[in-house]
Structures are given as structure tokens and as C-alpha cells.
Image (cartoon, helix red, strand yellow):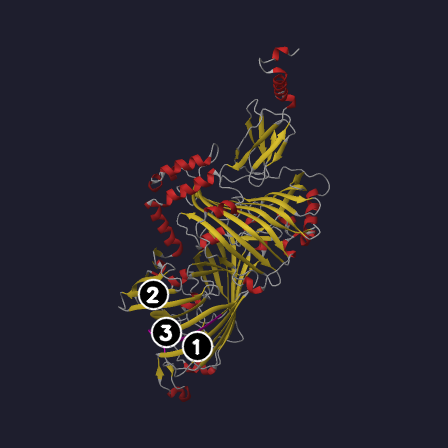
Amino acid sequence: MVGFLRVPGTGRRGLGVLLLLLLLSVPAWAQYVFSGRVTDSQTGDPVPFAGVMLRGKASGTTTNFEGYYRFLAKETSDSLLVSFIGYERKTKALVPGSFNPIVDFQLSPASTSLAGVVVRAGENPAFGILRQVLERRPLNDRKRLSAYEYDSYSKTELDIDNLSEKFRKRRVVKKITGVLERAEKLAGEDGQPLLPTFVSESVSKYYFRDAPQRKKEVILKTNVQGVGVKDGSFISQLVGGNSFQNYNFYDDYLPFLGKDFASPIGENWRGLYAYFLSDTVVVGDNVCFELEFEPQRKQDLAFTGTLWIDTTSYSLCQLDATIGKEANLNFIEKIKIQQELEPVLDADGRPLAWLPARTRFLVDIAELTKNSAGMLAKLYVSNRNFRVNQPRPLIFYDLPLEVADDARAPDPAYWAQARPDSLSREDRLARQLIDSVRNLPVVRTYVDIAEIATTGWKKYRRFEVGPYLYSVAYNSVEGLRLRAGFRTNDAFSRHWIFRGYGAYGTRDGQFKYGGEVNYLFSKRHWTVAGYRHTYDLERLGLDPELIQNNKLFYAFTRFGQYRGAYFRRENTFFVQSEVTKGITLSANLSTRSFNPLFPFSYRTDPRLGELSPMSSYFEYTQLTLEARFAKNETFLQDGNERITLGTKRIPVITLRYQRGLKGVLNGNFDFHRFQVTAYQSLRLGAVGRSNYLLTLAYTPSVVPAPLLFPHLGNETWFFNRNAFNLMNYFEYVSDRYASVQWQHNFEGFLFNRIPGIKKLKWRLVANANVLFGDQGTENQKLTARTFHPRFRQKYDFAPLDPTKPYVEVGYGIDNIFKLFRIQAIHRLTYLDGGEQKFAIKGSIHFAF
């Protein structure tokens, strides 16, 4: 019956093989293999956990964390269908007769809502699951571990996106047309073109221990390519390491971008989110509940997405969470976090806790204007080789961020084995595009401009010129003030740091100057010593050391009517060191002169009373000892510069003692001054954030008023959170005082609930300043009374009534046009002399 199949010369054996091949080709017995990748059409990132299935069939699978899928089926269909919450469904036709189709999808984001979900009579079934998650949180949260450590690989990419036609037509953009065409090829069939500007890889070891809490990251290797961002800079550390992107959804709130975002499995889940139990699915080796969630109010800082909860342990297995542009955020189109967790086991194979194995984080920054482009910041972290409950000695954690000496040395062989996955074609092309862009002269020019705008300094290889914020001012004493300064950087020396400036006033004809030399002994403990000399015009009550962190306010104090002006010559020797984690000790010996340009005098021999000779000029020598306690403070280090990212939940306490040395280096006075300050930022979740500054100060000595404690007033229109904003300059002086300065930002807590206003994304702010002070009789007699030029019934350097506090309160609106803050301030006490009772002051406040 099959003789017609016989092939000449094949014999029976050849006939059997041919028959077997024919039978295997029968569709009823076929085995189809479907594979491909699902990515986001806007960002190019993988879309994990998406459902892929044959249209009209029961066969399918979900994508893995990298967006890949692969599944087998005994039958085929005319098309493949992909769906996932937050994206539009997409279908692609299959080629008939294809047994191994490779089909890639690029999904377009879509708005989603659970508003149409109907929950029948009885409790929402998702609520019982969430209560179990909260109840068993202590058993699953990594916080139950006494210590853990792991190997970590992270990859960061910054891209320019939303390349509109208007943006392409700009002159600077036309010069990179060739690069843009290659970027379009990188985008793919359905995607939007991205222009990579920064790519960073790092391999590190991350360590954490509890009781006391310490953490440390040792960066073993880094590989950075970027336009305007160098390896080791503040930005590359912020986006390229693991320490600053370690998210734990078991916390009630997740802090990033200076905000607190509510976790969908936090304590406040019931009042912030809506939930829907959509399915029970298999995730790896676990059977999981699949819960969809969204915020009850779109303007709140809360997520939309999907949770996968293990049905046995009620632990979080994986998560996909997004914050959209409706949230009360500035400059942000979208924030997306995807995370996979895996259990770490004890010796008997039982889970001890769940740690993040893979995390993907994306921030989509909106276009600032219609003619500009947007930006994408993307981070991928892969962790492995977990080791738990074996804490290391405390001294091991002294330096929280450590970079190996050869971390930046090129080593292609190392990277080939260190990466969890080999570089894709898109990764290689992205690096080529960066090299093409950063070598263009027009791009380098724009990078220089951006660096000046953000740092205030212009870099010239081994030194930098600036800060430009202080370059020009105009006031009643100096007229037009012109200033130029410089500083060296680590390209000049890794230990020696030189700074200097010169300034000239056209009205007073005086040349002012300053110079400083530092030697950095140790970056591990940030031990630095140096010498500083300055001769400049200052304003009484505005000590540059006290307001140096508010550079914009300090720049504005150089403008306008210059009350309380005096020339000061200073020589200071100083040393500072972080002797152990969280404790910084410093000491300095300084000589200063006080040469006032306003009516001022003091009695040089107070024993003679009214008969004492008077003088307006004095010099003093002082020794200052300071201890600063800042537990769990985090720093970023770039060359010879270091900045703080603050502490978490712990106040920063500073103790200061100053000793005046009469007869030493022409010092005129003996005195003692004591001061204690405590500063803390309090995260209050949905209610916003509060900051307070508590200050206690005392001197038992009899000295001229400028050497007591002149309280910081503010006669400008610019609001200063460190000042008493309705107090005049040196209006009140104390030799002992206690003050509390408090500010609170409600974020969108109130305005998010008001129809019409909520779309403006305004934020309510409030503040209050309370000051108790006193000035002893002997100190009052020492300084001659000088009447205030505006309030003749009052004199400067006045004492406060120790039984009556100075109080001012304020309220206002933040985030006006995403940049401005307006605050109304009321002065509630000390109103007998015609003082200003009310004022509206503004400030520029950049925040997400």
C-alpha cells in the first residue's frame, strides 16, 4: 500500500525514515514552541509578569522578569495575545505552518481603573489576604534578620525620550541627526526612539546588620559611560549603587525623591487603596494570589499595580507598581517599580525571610517645556549569594560606601562573567550612541552650561571658578559688588585643597578677599585640617557659618539696605574628623576683628559705669570645640567633596563650646559660650513631613552685644526657615535663650481632597517660631543703646522679657507653578513699638 513512497536506492530502511518524518509532520501530533520578548514601547524596558496566550486557546504563559516568554503547545492559532494591567492588549498574527515562531511585542501604556469592579455582598476577598500579609509581616520581612549580605549587580541608564518634531528642529539637535536616526533603529518596530546619555554598571557587595543598625556597600567594579556625568560623581553614586535604591515594601512608606509613598501592604492600606483579587497563579515554585490595586485618590502618593502573595506563607513574592502623572508630583510622568523576592532558608530548609532577588526601577521625567525633550532614569539590580544572620564586627561598617582601588580599571573579561546576562544588541548600541554624542562640541558646551546651573561652578581641569551665585550684588554700602572665586579639585591633588576669592565694591572702593588651604588626611574618617584668612564686609546677626547651607538667602543678603554692616578680618586654624560612625569632632582657633560701619559702642571698663571710656572696635580670640552626633547619616563623596543625605528618624545633635582668650593674639575678652542644637526631619506618612530645630544657648560672661547671641532676623522679602522672619536684624540679643523653629509640609494631604484645586498640585505648608530669651543687667549696661532708624521708640540689641516668648506663625502654599512658595507670617508678640505684624514672603523651592 505504500509502495509508491519507495525512493530508488533507499531500500526498506530509507522508506521507514521517510515515513517517520511524514508522521511527525502531521498537525495532530505537532509540538509548537512559542517564544519572544515583551517590552514597553515608550521606555524599551522589559514587561515582566505579562500574560501571553494563544488566541482562542487555553495554552499560554507569563513573561519572566526580563520580559521573555517561552511555552509549548500541541496546537496553534492564528495569533498570539498579550495583556497586562497598565497596558493596552496587543495581538500579533502567526505565520501558518510555523512550529517555532519568535514573536516580540511592544506594549503601549494605558490608563487602568478598578472602578468598574463589582464586589458582591460580603467582604472583599482581598481584605482577608491583606490582613494575613500584615499579621505575618514580622515572619517574612527582612528586618527580622540580625544581618544579611549578598553580591549585587546593578545597571543604570539615563535616556532622553519624547523626541518631538519641535525638539528635532532645534539647531543643536540638528547637529546630531545621525545619532537620532540610529536611536530610531534602536527603538524597534512599535517603540519610541530613546537617546542614551548615561550607562553605568557596578558590581558590589552589600552588607547589613541590626542592633545597632549598620550598612555598607563595597563597590568592586564600575563601568561608566556618560554625557556630562563622570564615574564617581554624586549623580553616578545616587543612581548607580545599591545603597540608595533598596526598597522594602513591607515598610509603611517608601521614601524617594524626597517624598513618602504609601506601600500597598503597609498599615494604612485600607484607607488609601482599592483592591481586587483577580486570580490564583503559579509564580516559580509558589502558588500565589494575584491582587490588583490602585489609590482611592489619584493625586495621593500611592501606587497602581499588581501584587503576587504566596498562598502558604502570605509573603510578597513579586510586585509591579506604578505611580502616574496624576499624583501630586512635579516633573514626573511615571514611576515604576518591579520586584521579585526569594526566601532565604535556615538549616532545615524553612524560610527565614524574603529578600529582593531582582528589582527594576524607572522614573520618567516630563518635558519641562513644549520644545524640550523628557528623560528616563532606569535602574536594574540583581542580587545573589545571600548570607544571613552572621553579623560582622561594628568597625567593619565604619565606612558605609567604599570603592575598590581598581574599581574603575577596564576589564572586559571580568564584566563578561560578572553580568547576570550578556549585553544585548540594544545595550551595545546604546554605548556606541553615547560615545557619538559626548564627542560633539555642541553637546560638550551644553553640558558645561548645565553643570554651572546645577553646581554654580565652571570646571577647568584642575580647578573650578565660582560660585556664580555670589558674582554680582548691589547694596547701600558697597554699591555694585563684583566677586570672583576659585577652588581646586581632586585632579589637582587628592589631599591638598585650595580655595580663594576676591571682591570689590564700586561705592566704598574697598577690596575684600579670602583664602583657605585644607589638607585631607583621611577620606575614610574624613579627617581634614586647614587654615583660613578672610577680610570682608559682613552684616551683624548674619554669620556665614550659620546660614551657609542656604546659599540663595545668603546671596540675597548682599543686596539692598545694608544695616549692621561691619568689616571683619579673620584668621582660623581648624581640624575636623569623623572619629567613629556618626560622631564628628572639630576644633578651631580663630582671631577676629569687629569694625562697625553703624553707630555702636561699648564700655571698655564697665566698673566705671557711665564714666567708662567707649570704643566701637574690638578684637577677640576664641577656641571652639564641637561634637556632632548624627546616627546612621549617609554621605555621598565626589573627589575632595562630600555632601550629606541626612539621617533616618534620628535627630542630629550638635554640642558647641567657645572660649574667649584675653591677651592671646590681641584678644580683648575672656568669655565662655555654650550651645546645643537638635535638628530632625520627621516622616509622617500621608500627613507630610515636619522639620524642627531646637536650640539652647548660654553665656555667663559680660561681653559686647555682638559676642552674645544676636537672634537671626530677616528684613528681606525672601523667606528663610532658619530666621525669625518678622524680626529685624539684631533687634534682640540674649545671653541665654531657648528656641524652637518648626516647619511642616502637608504635601497634598488637604488640597488633594478639594475638587478643582487638586489638579494644581498645590501643597499646604505651615511654620511656627518660638523664642524665650534674657539678657543680664551687666550685659545691658555694657553696650550703649542705639535707636533703631525706623522705630525711634526702640533700640537695637534689646533684651527679651524672660517671661514672654517671641512668637511668629505662618502658613502658605507651596508648589505654585512647581517652583514658588508664598507664606503669610504673623508676629504675635512684642508689638508695642510699631513693629511689622504681618508680611507675605516668598521663596524658590525646587522639589519633586
Q: Nearer the viewer, residue 627 or 709?
A: 627
Q: Earlier in the sequence, mark 1 or mark 3?
A: 3
Write the residue at 42% across / 88% down. 607
Q: Position of residue 288 (x, y in %)?
A: 67, 42
Give the quarter of the image for residue 27: top right
Q: Secondary structure at mark 1?
A: strand
Q: Amino acid at mark 3?
A: Asn
Q: Residues within 10 Å of mark 1 (few under 14, many from 20)?
A: some
Which residue was labeled with disc 2? 500
Which residue was labeled with disc 1? 623
- Position of 631 with respect to 346 (left or right) is left
Q: Between marks 3 and 2, how big is the CA–CA gap?
A: 14 Å
Write the residue at 65% across / 38% down. 117
Q: Nearer the viewer, residue 819 or 31?
A: 31
Which residue was labeled with disc 3? 571
Q: Does the stretch in magenta take in 598? A: yes
Q: Position of residue 32 (x, y in %)?
A: 61, 27
Q: Does the stretch in magenta take in 64? A: no
Q: Which residues are magenta?
A: 585-600
Q: Secondary structure at mark 2?
A: strand
Query: Magenta region, mostly helix, strand or loop?
Result: strand
Q: Position of residue 38 (x, y in %)?
A: 54, 35
Q: Position of residue 726 (x, y in %)?
A: 45, 66
Q: Amino acid at mark 2?
A: Gly
Q: Amino acid at mark 1?
A: Leu
